[in-house]
Amino acid sequence: MRDRTLVIGAAGWCVAVFALYGVLAWMLHTPHIPHYLLMLLAILAVPLARLSAAPLALAWNRHR
């Protein structure tokens, strides 16, 4: 894989995590829930392994 593909994938993952964090922070804006817990939930909710494996799977299927 090219470096550009890896950077685009990582940037897409970060955008998805921050978007989900923004939605969670907007919906659950209370002093009882700390913001770092919302960020942790957003990080755990967005799958990193599947996104990083998708280009490899596509390249493997293309060369079969």
Image (cartoon, helix red, strand yellow):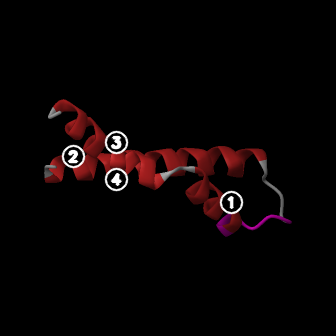
Where's residue 7, x and y in %? 25, 52
> How far apart, in angstroms, are the residues tagged by discs 3 and 4?
12 Å
Mark 1 lies on residue: 38
Q: Are marks 4 and 2 in contact (CB under 8 Å)?
A: no
Mark 2 lies on residue: 5
Earlier-in-chain disc, 4 versus 1: 4
Is 36 on the left or on the right of 58, as rendered?
right
- On residue 10, the disc is 4
Q: Residue at x 16, y 49 (%)?
A: 1
SS for callout 2: helix
Q: Which residues are magenta?
A: 32-36
Q: Mark 2: which amino acid?
A: Thr
Q: Nearer the viewer, mark 4 or mark 1?
A: 4
Is 39 on the left or on the right of 6, as rendered?
right
Q: Mark 4: which amino acid?
A: Ala
Where's residue 45, x and y in %? 61, 51
Q: Nearer the viewer, mark 2 or mark 1?
A: 2
Which quarter of the picture shows residue 58?
A: top left
- Let me know if residue 11 appears in the view: no
**Front position in the image: 51 or 59:** 59
Circle 4 packing at 10 Å, graded few (<14), some (14-19), many (20+), is some
Which quarter of the picture shows residue 40?
A: bottom right
Earlier-in-chain disc, 3 versus 4: 4
Q: Are marks 2 and 3 in contact (CB under 8 Å)?
A: no
Mark 3 lies on residue: 54
Earlier-in-chain disc, 4 versus 2: 2
**Front position in the image: 13 or 36:** 13
